[in-house]
Amino acid sequence: MTDENERSRPEDDAARLGLVVVGEAAALHAGDDASLDASEENIRETVDSMVDEPLTARQEEVVERLVSASGTLTAGLSGALATKTGGSVDDVLEGAARSVLWQQRLAAERDAAQQERVHGQDADGTAPASSTVVDRDERPEPGEREDAGRQQRSRDDDGRGEA
């Protein structure tokens, strides 16, 4: 994960947990015991790697059940969406995983831009050559939530994403 003196960003931890939830949903749709066992082990390992101190048995049980319940909800919603749209559950879950990673990327870009403003330099330590104009569709207004779904609303008429 990270050096013991370095903490991961909350957005990175949230993305890891989001991907674990999508993995749990995929295991539930797969329906085989090996997939479910691997997903449960992944939940435990991910949570263990994120905590500063070992959780009590009760805390660990609660966190595992929260992630499992989230995976169950994700599985149900992805199945319903796949049925409604005529797509496959795998495609819906892949889209969910892409959305999680998109949110993480947006947060990392926002943090890098903030660091640049604070320090007046690019990530490589050089002074910025010029300011970059960012399209309104790519960045939220201050105080507005980022919307990973925005990429899903950018669809052409047949429902497929723009290439």
Image (cartoon, grey):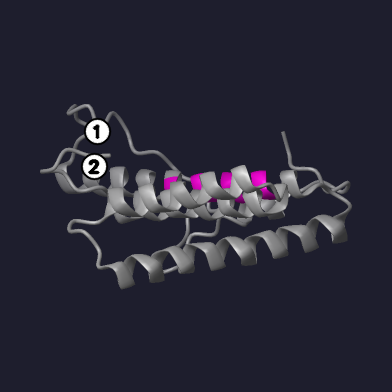
Q: Can see residue 145?
A: no
In the image, what residue type sits under mark 1? Asp
- The residue furthest front is 33
Label 2: which residue?
116
Magenta-colored span: 93-104
Q: Residue at x 71, y 64 (%)?
A: 77
Q: Does residue 129 lie above or below 34 as drawn?
A: above
40 within the magenta span = no
Q: Does residue 57 lie above or below 120 as drawn?
A: below
Mark 2 neighbour class, 10 Å CA radius: few under 14, some 14 to 19, many 20 or more: some
Closest to the observer, 28 or 75: 28
Give the farthest residue toward the left: 5
Quadrant the C terminus occupies? top right
- The residue labelled by disc 1 is 122
Label 2 is placed on what type of residue?
A: Glu
Q: Earlier in the sequence, mark 2 or mark 1?
A: 2
Quarter of the image that includes the N terminus: top left
Is residue 127 shown above or below 111?
above
Q: Is residue 69 left or right of residue 61?
A: right
Mark pair 2, 1: CA separation: 5 Å
The residue lying at 74 percent from left, 42 percent from top is 161
Secondary structure at numbered mark 1: loop
Contact flag, marks 2 and 1 (Cβ < 8 Å): yes
> Residue 145 at what x, y percent from top left?
47, 65
Residue 35: where, in percent of width, then height? 61, 44
